[in-house]
Image (cartoon, rainbow, N blue to C red):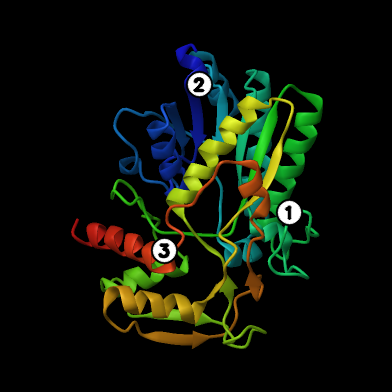
Amino acid sequence: MQEHERHVLVTGGAGYIGSHAVLALQDAGWQVSVIDNLSTGNRAALPPEVAFHHGDIGNEALLAEIFAARPARAVMHFAGSIVVPESVSDPLGYYHNNTVKSRALIAAAVAAGVPHFVFSSTAAVYGEPAKVPVAEDSAKAPINPYGASKLMTEQMLADTAAAHPLNYAALRYFNVAGADPEGRSGQSTPAATHLIKVACEAVVGKREGVAIFGSDFPTPDGTGVRDYIHVADLAQAHVLALEALIAEPTRSLVMNCGYGRGYSVREVLDAADRVAGTAIARQEQPRRAGDPPALVADNSLIRATLPWTPRYEDLDTIVAHALAWERKLAAG
């Protein structure tokens, strides 16, 4: 296999999930290039040998230059905006950043003859599912612009794959957390909103406590229930999805990425207390716009389709890795 046939362009590769995918690709023997506008990403999250392009995925001319200089076997697309309440207050910003720019990226990939595309989608496409755990064939009814913007990109990929020699995997994430077990990367996003990240920041003194947004949901303890997946297991799923696309170039994949087990906000904070050996201050606040009561994956499809065996399927382990990273950041 020629060098360019082992080359993947990763968008948003300096961000939280993207940087872990870069590590997983490298660990699997892939050559990696990254494009990131560094709006939320961090150049230091990437190994120094990774070719880095500081730019925006909406810039089709720049993408054409990148593909011309170094043909890619695949695009792995993580770039985008991800904060649900922010999408409710700034819907046009989210449709521009997540949908319009994804269209530019897909067009550039097709023009360059890139045959495979792995997309970072979300469980938010399901909205408030009628049945939990939620399977891939459940109704897609997003209740916020974030989920809608991602669903539109899934539709663009499906239509593009029908018209061009490109196949794709859309991986619908549930709640991603944790950090690289070897301490090579973690979540460094400023003003992060992910619960486990926020809890770990509270442990190291970066925050006074943790807000519980909503204690009146129709769940066992009244707080929102989510399926937390370790970022390293998620990154591994991306590499395996890419290998599956290469093995069957006429097949595309749409799969949930979660463990199939939900934890409430209170259960997550209890785990953080256990791991840290301290009690994190909690403040109850009203629900946030666009938050469903419960989102848990039916992950039977990904387990049947890919040789994916999660290694960190334990809430305390996820919290411990996130906390180790937070302590590393706090130490400078």
Looking at this rendering, what residue extends furthest in the top direction?
2
Q: In the image, what residue occupies the spot 30% across and 46% down? A: 184
Quarter location, residue 328: bottom left
Q: In the image, what residue occupies the spot 48% across and 11% down? A: 2
Q: In the image, what residue occupies the spot 39% across and 32% down? A: 26
In terms of sequence position, does the residue under pointer 2 or pointer 3 come before the other? 2
Looking at this rendering, what residue extends furthest in the left direction?
331
**Amino acid type shown at disc 2:** Ile
Q: Which residue is mark 2?
A: 66
**Amino acid type shown at disc 3:** Ala
| Labels 1 & 3 near each other (Cβ < 8 A) | no
Q: CA distance from mark 1 to mark 3?
A: 31 Å
On the image, the x and y values in percent for residue 59 come to 57, 31
- Quarter that holds the C terminus: bottom left
Residue 69 higher or lower than 184, as above or below: above
Q: CA distance from mark 1 to mark 2?
A: 34 Å
Q: Which residue is mark 1?
A: 136
Q: Which residue is mark 3?
A: 191
The label nearer to you, 1 versus 2, is 1
On the image, the x and y values in percent for residue 238 come to 54, 40
Q: Residues within 10 Å of mark 1 (few under 14, many from 20)?
A: some
Q: Residues within 10 Å of mark 3 (few under 14, many from 20)?
A: few
Q: CA distance from mark 2 to mark 3?
A: 31 Å
